[in-house]
Structures are given as C-alpha cells and as structure tokens.
Amino acid sequence: MSAIRDEVLAANKVYATQFGEKAKLAMPPGRRFAILTCMDARLDPAKYAGLSEGDAHVIRNAGGRASDDAIRSLVISYKLLGTREWFVIHHTDCGMETFTDEIMRGLLAKSLTTAAIDAHGWHDTGQGPGSTEGAFIDWLTIADQVESVCADIRRIRTHPLVPRAIPIHGYIYDVKTGQLVEVPEATRIGA
C-alpha cells in the first residue's frame, strides 16, 4: 500500500462517519447549473462558486476545455438531469499554456515517463520506449485564455445537441486573487 492511498482511505472513513443527510441528495443538481473547469489542484469550484454537495455538476479536465467528452457530459447534465445554465471557467497560470501539441507529441514519442520543465522548456526525464499514439490527439492547448474561453463556448453553442435556450457564461479564475473575471465576449457568444 502507498502512503497516499492510506491517507485517502483514512480521510474517507472520517467523511463517511459524518455522511448523514447527504444520503438523501437527489441525483439532479439542486441549483440546476453545471461548471466546466480545469483539473488544476489550485481550483476549488465548491469554494469559488459557493457550492455544497448536490448543488451543481462540475466537469473537470486539463484546461477546462470543451472536448467531445466535456460536451457529452454537459448534454447529459441538461437532457437527463435538468441543468439550465452552464459556466465555462478557465484560469490564469494554466499548465495548458506551457506547451503545444507538437511539444506533447515529441515528448510522448521519446518516452512515457513524466517530463520536467525548466527555463528552457519541457524535457524528457527518461529513456524510451515512447509512443506515437499521441499524434492522433488534439491536446487542446491554450495560447490565449480569453480566446480559449470564447472558442470553447463557441464550440458548445454550435454543437447540434446543445439547445439555444441554455445560457453559457465565460469566466477566467485568477489563481492569485481567487476572483472570477468575466469574459464578456464569451458570455455574449453563449447568450
């Protein structure tokens, strides 16, 4: 067993003893909205959006991008579980800004071990084998936060399974202040 696994299981044991009324929460989110945001560990959507368990759906991936799977989750959130409003929230100082598709493909082609970054960029830390499978993935990297929020909302808004009636709001979370900063152009696209 790993120390991290032990810590997770110990924390869960404490949590389960205090679970109480949470067992009665309904499957649909009580506040009827969903958030698409980044998996970055510095972001706590429950805190920055004032959520309690059962309030909203939170969909997380690298960069908070509107990938096919994220849109799939949003459509399920709406169609089967009744959300009526969506938020796309990217953030400052995102790791997805530190590389391009070409860099990721090159790193994966060299080895599958964890890479490292320094002042000169990303570097492999191990020896092969690598894989060219990464050549077929759009990594959805970010060159400009405002444009990425706009592009994601545009992609969601124009998807044939997304009803026009759902408002989609665009924000950037500032990791230095904790504030959500609206991207007005993105929200206009999502209106």
Image (cartoon, rainbow, N blue to C red):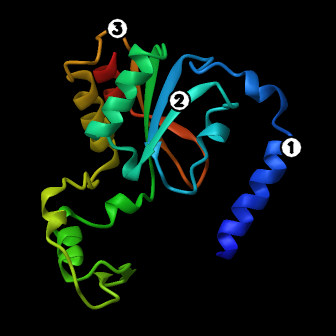
Q: Secondary structure at mark 2?
A: strand
Residue 9: horizontal and vertical position, in percent? 72, 59
Tell me the amino acid under the disc marked 1. Thr
Q: Which labelled disc corresponds to residue 17?
A: 1
Q: Place residue 176 in its image quadrant.
A: bottom right
**On screen, residue 112 above or below 61:** below
**On screen, residue 183 above or below 124:** above
Q: Give the class, few, some or many, for how many residues have Cα within 10 Å of label 2's Cα (few <14, many ≥20).
A: many
Residue position marked by numbered label 3 in the rendering = 165
Q: Can you say which quadrant of the picture contains the N terminus?
A: bottom right
Q: Is residue 104 left or right of residue 136?
A: right
Q: Which residue corresponds to the image point at 35% horizontal and 80% vertical from the top-left?
A: 113
Q: Give the class, few, some or many, for how many residues have Cα within 10 Å of label 1's Cα (few <14, many ≥20).
A: few
Tell me the amino acid under the disc marked 3. Ala
Q: Earlier in the sequence, mark 2 or mark 3?
A: 2
Residue position marked by numbered label 2 in the rendering = 57
Measured Cα–Cα span from mark 2 to mark 3: 18 Å
Q: Which labelled disc corresponds to residue 151?
A: none
Q: Can you say which quadrant of the picture contains the C terminus?
A: top left
Q: Earlier in the sequence, mark 1 or mark 2?
A: 1
Question: Could you say which is closer to the camera, residue 51 or residue 143?
Answer: 51
Residue 178: horizontal and vertical position, in percent? 61, 46
Q: Is residue 74 left or right of residue 35?
A: left
Measured Cα–Cα span from mark 1 to mark 3: 42 Å
Q: Is residue 103 left or right of residue 177?
A: left
Q: Earlier in the sequence, mark 1 or mark 3?
A: 1
Q: Secondary structure at mark 1?
A: helix
Q: Which residue corresponds to the image point at 27% horizontal and 55% vertical from the top-left?
A: 141
